[in-house]
Image (cartoon, helix red, strand yellow):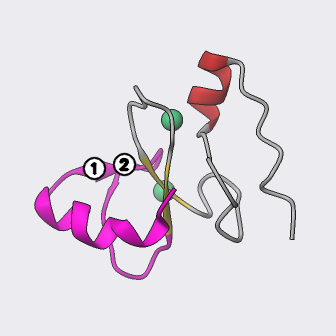
Amino acid sequence: MMPLAINASAAERPGKIYCYCRCPYDEVSEMIACDGEDCRIEWFHFECVGIMVPPKGKWYCPDCRKKHGIVQNNEYCD
Ligand SMILES: [Zn+2]
Ligand SMILES: [Zn+2]
């Protein structure tokens, strides 16, 4: 989980659509990568997945949590 890596990876793929809101990358929104191996979206805006601060450790988007039965509970810590 490396929120800051978006700068590099997004630049390599101009025009790629991210997140549930289907937006292209923009510099002002903080984004988080899903750790699900076959995640269909991969990158999400913090506000679109309801997180305020980068979670520690792995983070899975709601789709992957449902698909793999993952209980994500670290997003409310600290
Ligand atoms: Zn979004
Ligand atoms: Zn995912």
Question: Mark 1 vs mark 2: which is more N-terminal?
Answer: 1
**Residue type highlighted by circle 2:** Arg
**Residue type highlighted by circle 1:** Ile
Q: Residue 71 placed where, x, y %?
A: 79, 31
Residue 27, image quadrant: bottom left
Give the residue at the far bottom of this rendering: 28
Residue 22: which numbered mark, if any?
2
Residue 17: which numbered mark, if any?
1
> Does the residue at mark 1 contact the one at mark 2 (Cβ under 8 Å)?
yes
Secondary element under disc 2, as helix, strand or loop, is loop
Secondary element under disc 1, as helix, strand or loop, is strand
Closer-to-camera residue (72/41): 72
The verdict on label 2 being within 8 Å of ligand 1 is yes
Question: Bounds of the magenta span?
Answer: 1-30
Left or right side of 28 for 55 = right
Residue at image location 71% in from the left, 18% down from the top: 69
Q: Residue 64 placed where, x, y %?
A: 57, 28
Closer-to-camera residue (16/4): 4
Residue 23 drawn in magenta: yes
